[in-house]
Image (cartoon, rainbow, N blue to C red):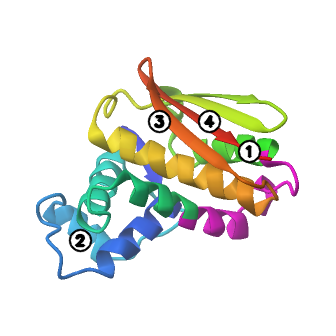
Amino acid sequence: MGLKVKGTVLIDLVKQVRSAKDRNWEKYLTAEDMELINGEIMTSSWYPDDFFYRLSLAVFKVTGESNLDNSFAYGQLTAHNMADVYKNVIVQNDPATTIERFVSRRKSFFSTDYQDSERNQVIKDDKKVTIYTISDKKIRGTEVSEVIMYSVMGVAHELATIVGGHNVQSHLVKHNEGFKITISWL
């Protein structure tokens, strides 16, 4: 069957491509990718993981100008959409539980195969959350893996702010085969 990604994860990425049609997407996206982008992406439909990986890297390279800070900012932007749509993720005045729920909810955006291949561990403290994550073997150690994790960090950071965390700080480091993301607040 192969790994699949829910359309809900793709919508904002697709909007980036559509809003900058004059840019050089051909270097990163296939003709089939462009057909999907120019068609109708359904939030509840499943799409190939390779499309998600190419689309993530393309947006990072073309509109994100290969800047990981832009991947972080993209994650912050999508956090607001998540907070609006997935209200059960939000626990006001509790950034740790909110981030834990986000990490858990995020898994539902990927097919069972992906859920089994990406491993996450969340450790909650009073004013800090540490997320240990190991990416899908297919992208482990590649540039797109880091791009995706910076976006995840941006979502977690912004969710902590949305629910009342003050002076939120975020940090990502490569850790073993994956990454360690730390979000802290006052």
User: N-terminal of the two: label 2 or label 1?
Assistant: 2
SS at mark 2 in the image: helix
Q: Which residue is mark 4?
A: 182
Q: Secondary structure at mark 3?
A: helix
Q: Residue at x 77, y 55 (%)?
A: 166
Amino acid type shown at disc 3 = Tyr
- Quadrant of the image occupied by residue 107: top right
Crowd band around label 2 with a 10 angstrom C-alpha radius: few (<14), some (14–19), many (20+) = few
Find residue 15 and report its horizontal and vertical position in percent: 39, 75
Which-is-in-front pick, marks 2 and 1?
A: 1
Left or right relative to 6: residue 145: left
**Res. 48 in view:** yes
Q: Amino acid at mark 2?
A: Glu
Image side of residue 50 versus residue 112, left or right: left
How many neighbours does mark 4 have within 10 angstroms: few (below 14), some (14-19), or many (20 or more)? many
Q: Residue at x 71, y 64 (%)?
A: 83
**Numbered badge on residue 35:** 2
Inspect this view and state whether residue 45 appears: no
Q: Nearer the viewer, residue 148 or 7?
A: 148
Q: Residue 5, image x and y in percent?
A: 45, 50
Is 135 displayed left or right of 104 in the figure?
A: left
For marks 4 and 2, give the CA distance: 38 Å
The Cα–Cα distance between marks 2 and 3, rounded to whole angstroms, is 24 Å
| Tag of residue 114 | 3
Percent x, y of residue 175: 46, 22
Residue at position x 27%, y 80% from top? Answer: 20
Eye-nearest disc, 1 or 4: 4
| Residue range of the region highlighted in magenta in the rendering | 77-95
